[in-house]
Image (cartoon, helix red, strand yellow):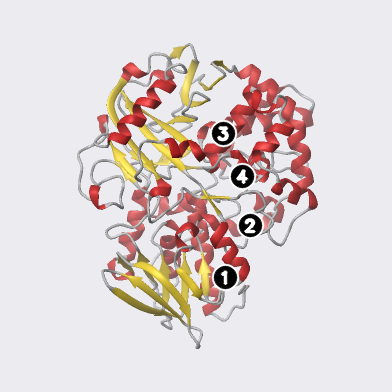
Amino acid sequence: MSRTPALRAIRDHFRDIARAEARDTTLTEIQDDRALRAERRHAEGPPPTRRQFVMGAAAVAGAAVTWNVGRAVAQSAPRIAIVGGGIAGLSAALTLVDAGYSPTIYEAHPNRVGGRMLSERGTRPGCGSCHSVNRTVSATWADGQVTDVFGELIDTNHTTIRSLAERFGLGLTDLIAAHPAGSTDTYYFFGRRYPAADAQRDFEATYRALREDVRAAGYPTTWDDSSAAGRALDSMSVYDWIESRVRGGHGSPFGMLLDAAYAIEYGADTTDQSALNLVYMLGYSGRTFSIFGESDERYRLTGGIDLVTDAIGEYLGPESIELGWYMESIRQNAGGTYTLTFDAGGTQVVVADYVLLTVPFPVLRDLDYSQAGFDARKDLAIQTLGAAKNGKLHVQFDTRLWNGDGAWGRGNGNSYSDTGYQCTWESTRGQGGQSGILICYTGGSVVDTLALRHSYGNMDSAGVRTDTGDFLDRIEPVFPGISARWNGRAQESVAHLNPFFRSSYANLEPGQYQTICGYERVRQGNVFFAGEMCSQDFQGFMEGGAVEGVRAANEILSAMRGGRGRRR
């Protein structure tokens, strides 16, 4: 699956080629069939993930999330400490409360839960972490539009997030249903447009090399399960894969398209990514190459993504959440309990029987866990797991120029280019008003060139004003006339500069699939781990955080009930 709408088109092209070859039919017929199947899938429910397909129907059945709504009475009162109040910590706490237990979430932020799920609607600052904007601000956007500062898109098979929305009575906006008819993505490289027909031809030329790599590598490649081909591809960078598999390498429009796509998708230059990021993203294949369905980015939470985390926090109540508690250390005690030390406006000490750590590894690596009893591989995972760097600039225009007919054809807001801005998509699809907001999404070393050197800013920030001006200059050749339609409003976020995140999400660097992938989630004694970095199928997604929170909570429940499980 993909984190950005624009990369979905690349992946879909590869899968269409695979189907056409397997069925000995035309590409047009396959594309028409895909559109029909997408509508059927929407009606029938989500497709399986890679792991569910490999493991079979039992895994699919077991993947469904059900909530035992209502607070039971626990027969015992173990002390359960959850460090981190993002979606992983919240979904874990909700699962434990539903089972009758009373965990406590310790969240570093002084006045909110939700982590990287935060919306900009003017009722509170978009930064959500910094004292300089820790105040109510005026409405950022015209037409009452709402944007999501960090995490945003929800796939059809993101069943945990969707079930949480349903549980708390929150709506989903169908972005595909709101898509302009006949629209296409826009590519612009080497000073000219890169037409869909040319891109399709280049997809076909690259497909066979990709198929061979996918089949040879197998799925998954983890610290304890890998093939020789998988390890070789893991040791290769995405950059080198493009150079060796794509005709013309980075001197071709398609090579540059892939490079831009993966730089923003994983928040790292392609030289700093395992080639398996690309191979697994474009599709694992036992036989048919397209068995996992589509990553459709179909939904967005109506009204803003933080409505779901706010709802969980309100349900759990203040008695379950300590705000402004920043963990400094964790120590294993002789009796098997754990002592956690926090800075909460003064030193606070908590003793717990079970601990769940959900903070991102780039934050955890700077805390003192030297006496927690973690093994060497866990320490390696915490200290070295790649940390994505992304910039997300929202720019509002008085009209959605990209949806009309122009030199770009008929667009939908999704674009890639080498003019300096990398990627865009529209964040106001399905929202009312004539105004429209494009997201300029950047990744890797490009983020280091942004003028904003803070985790959040709006038009009060000189950095945001500079970055917006640069973006308008760089997108003007792609959508001529768009700069004149800017209404003077913009907002920007850089997640890795936020002291509570220090990354956009996880990124597996060359060699890390075979050394630490899958070990991120492995418990250490009675210390458990959750967060998007722990998920194989949904790493980097809100769904990854949610589903891993549920998984870790169930592991804790099993441990409390006498289940052995894997301790390390």
Q: Earlier in the sequence, mark 1 or mark 3?
A: 3
- In percent of width and height, residue 259 lies at 60, 33
Q: Which residue is mark 4?
A: 273
User: As shown in the figure, which amino acid type bears the numbered disc 1?
Assistant: Arg
- In percent of width and height, residue 82 lies at 42, 69
Query: How dense is the environment of label 2, judged by Cα within 10 Å: few (below 14), some, or many (20 and up)?
Result: many
In 3D space, how far apart are the residues under numbered discs 3 and 4 (Cα atoms)? Answer: 12 Å
The disc at residue 517 is 2
In 3D space, how far apart are the residues under numbered discs 1 and 3 (Cα atoms)? Answer: 34 Å
Q: Earlier in the sequence, mark 4 or mark 1?
A: 4
Q: Which residue is mark 3?
A: 261
Q: Residue at x 65, y 39 (%)?
A: 238
Q: Which residue is mark 1?
A: 523
Q: Earlier in the sequence, mark 3 or mark 4?
A: 3
In 3D space, how far apart are the residues under numbered discs 2 and 4 (Cα atoms)? Answer: 13 Å
Query: How dense is the environment of label 3, judged by Cα within 10 Å: few (below 14), some, or many (20 and up)?
Result: many
Secondary-structure class at tag 4 = loop
User: As shown in the figure, which amino acid type bears the numbered disc 3?
Assistant: Ala
**Numbered disc in front, either 1 or 3:** 3
Q: Earlier in the sequence, mark 2 or mark 3?
A: 3
- In percent of width and height, residue 493 lies at 37, 41
**Numbered disc in front, either 4 or 1:** 4
Query: How dense is the environment of label 1, judged by Cα within 10 Å: few (below 14), some, or many (20 and up)?
Result: many
Q: Residue at x 56, y 39 (%)?
A: 269
**Numbered disc in front, either 2 or 4:** 4
User: Between 172 and 480, which is closer to the camera in this rendering?
Assistant: 480
Secondary-structure class at tag 3 = helix
